[in-house]
Structures are given as structure tokens and as C-alpha cells.
Image (cartoon, grey):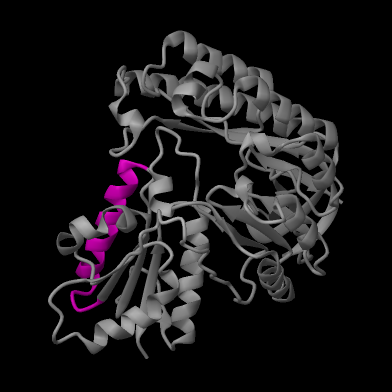
Amino acid sequence: MKKAALHNLGCKVNAYETEAMEELLKKDGFEIVGFDEKADVYVINTCSVTNIADRKSRQMIHRCKKLNPEACVVAAGCYVQNFGKDIADELGADIILGNNKKNDLVEKVHEYYQNLDSSDGPLLDCVDINDGNVSYENMRIEKDSEHTRAFVKVQDGCNQFCTYCIIPFARGRIRSRDIDDVVEEVTGLAKAGYKEVVITGIHLSSYGSGTDYDLADLLEAIQKIDGVERIRMGSLEPQIVTEEFGKRVSALSKMCPHFHLSLQSGCDTVLERMNRKYNSEEYYKGVEILRKYFDNPAITTDIIVGFPGETEEEYETTLDFVKKVKFAELHVFAYSKRAGTRAAKMPGQITNAVKKERSSKLIALGNEKTLEYKHSHIGRTLDILFEEKTTINNEEYFIGFSKEYIKCAIKAGDKDYANTILKVKATEFTPDNEYLLVEI
């Protein structure tokens, strides 16, 4: 039996696609082994969101040949979609699969082995992803439950063209998965034992664009599936949060009050240079709507510091906005110049030293707000989906997450709480603030 190993780089959408490719290989008779083991086929699902992601993608591809020089190395995904045709010969991969071609993995592996003796270069399969006629590539996960939470991809592509981002060029235009197909997959995952599904996409807020359905319609359909007890969403654009959206989503008993609203900057002039489609006032209005319809929801976000031309005053405006919103969690990124984007050519590029200083200060503020949010749940009754057992201070606990995605722990005793949802009372945090301790 041939062996295959897979490695994922990048976002949750990439992770979902990697799992789907793993299932394709299993169905073809491959044994899946750890990436550090010797395999006949290695699959790297690459990322291109930053220059560092590009470099890691190249490193992982080269590493495969060191693990087994005779192996078939498959490079798939965003990095090779952007650059595969130009660097195919020097990349070191035997098969290069762009986005929207990952379902063809097994076919291409067989083609590679059939032509092994006559091959004169890597097997390249990349579509013009920016052709508006490219359709959604249906991939699916059917595996038995190994965890409590399953990620489900429902959308691909992006039409936003933020000035710092290369992803629209790697993923193409927005396209959505049919609701019935999503429902069928989630129904299968629920039967396999998954209790929570996380709906993901490259630009999730655009789900259903150009059709007669939207993201709220999809969430309402998933709400009706027996066995699914929690629905969580990936990153959203703030514009999607309207009064109607708030009403419809808050009416769903399975919806987790955890919303990742992409911000990037709290300063309107920076948002304009980024080509974001909202201002800080519109963003804050969305936050207020969510807090109107949900009780103390977790509002999380990501912020880029050191964007070209960002003055100290603009940076301070972002700090003030973070204090105003009181985020449950911040993901802070220093701006990374990306070849092929408009921002890379903008004047006023910020030095690494300034970016590092601003990042540190914003991370510290974010940590402060995270602690405030987490501690606001002490004394409250929470729904926890417990996952696995661990040891805390020499005692055994089961750990899991609240609907707000707060990591919680309960003393195990002689109970098995794995993949169980319990209503519990939050009592206190561990000294390192990692776990919120709860009791029945």
C-alpha cells in the first residue's frame, strides 16, 4: 500500500481543503502517515497571504525531497496559483495544482506515475482563477469524528481587492456552494458525531452573492439539522451586520455569540488607503447591533499596524477605537509588503522597528481587553462543549470551549465529559488565566 503525507499552510479554508484531499487519497487506497515519515506522495497545500507564507511554502516543498528523494511531491494552493507557472522548474515539486484543481489530486498522481519514465518536467495544472466563469469547486469531508468541531467551507474567492492583499488574485472571484450541498455534508458530519460546525470561506460575508439566498439563509438551514448543536462562523465583514441580520441570526438557538469582524484599522484615513469598504463609525454600528441582539457576545478582530503612511496620530486613533469597542480578542499583524499589490508601491513605508513597537503596544492593549472580557463571565452560567482530558496543577480536568470561545475546564473525577455539552457555572480563572474553571 502506498503512503501519503499532507501538510497544510494558512487559513481554515486551506485546512478544510487539505482534509478533503486526504480523504480523496484514502479512498484511492493510500495509507495516510505523519508528515515527518517516509511517504510515496507528499502534498503541500501552500499559502501566499504574506512573503513569509511564500517562503514557508517553498521550504516545505524542498523538505519533502529530503524526506524521500523518490517521492512524488504535490504543491497545491495559493502560492503555486500565483507563481507556479513562473517557478515550476525550480520549485522542486512534481505536480503543481492551482486552486479549483484540488479535486483532481488523485487523477494527477496516477498520471504522474504513468508518465514517470517520459516526464520532462513538473505536471502543471492551474486554471485562470480570475476568469469570472470559474465555478465553485465542490469538496467534501465525510470522515468519522475525531474532534468535536468540524470546519465546513461554503464560499471561495474575493472581490474586495484591498490594497494590501494578494488573495483575490490567488482565489479568484466570489462563488458560493449550493445550500443543499452544504446541508448534506453537515448532516453527515452530525451523524458522524460532530456537535459543532464552523462555517468558513475566503470572503464569507459574500456567500450567496448572485443567487436568491444569503448567509442567513444558510445558517437557518443548518439550524434545522438534527445532531448539530452549535453553529460558529468564520471571519465576517462588518457591512453584513444589519438589523435584519442581527434579528435572524439571534433567533437561531444553535448560533454561538462569537463574531470575528475584520477591522484592519480603527482610523478612517487608513481604512480608505486600504480600500476597505466601511469606516469606523459603520463598524461600531455593527458591533452595537450584535450587542443588542446577543448577551455579551465575543467580538474579535484582526488589525494591521504600520500600513504605508500610517502616522503616529492615525495609530493612536486605532488604539482609541480598540478601547472603545472592547474586543474580546485581537489578532495583530505588522504590515507585510506584498509584491503585486497597490500598497507595496505606496509612499511612506514604515520601518520594521516602528512596526514592531506599535505591534507590541497594541498586543498589550488587546491582552488587557481579553482579560476584561473573559473575567466578565465569572459567576455566569455557560454552555461548554468539552473536548479532551488534561492535567492542571496535578489534577485531571476536561477542557472545552464556551459558545463565546472561552477555554474552560472542569474537574474530571470519574466522569467522561468528552464531546458533551453541559450547562455549568463559571467560578474563577486559573492563575495563568488560561482556563476558566467551571462546576456543575
The image quadrant of residue 300 is top right
State the residue at coordinates (40%, 22%): 306
Residue 280, percent from left and from top: 61, 21
State the residue in front, 340 or 130.
130
The image quadrant of residue 430 is top right
Residue 355, percent from left and from top: 37, 22
State the residue in front, 304 or 209.
209
State the residue in front, 341 or 390.
341
Q: What range of the chain is rendered magenta?
A: 50-71
The image quadrant of residue 412 is bottom right
**From what the image shows, is residue 20 above or below residue 294?**
below
State the residue at coordinates (40%, 71%): 34
Q: Is residue 359 visible?
A: yes
Tell me if residue 55 is in the magenta stretch: yes
Locate residue 85 relative to residue 105 in the image: left or right: left
Secondary structure character of the magenta stretch overall? helix
Residue 313, percent from left and from top: 47, 8
**From what the image shows, is residue 2 above or below residue 279?**
below
Residue 226, percent from left and from top: 82, 69
Locate residue 111 relative to residue 334 in the image: left or right: left
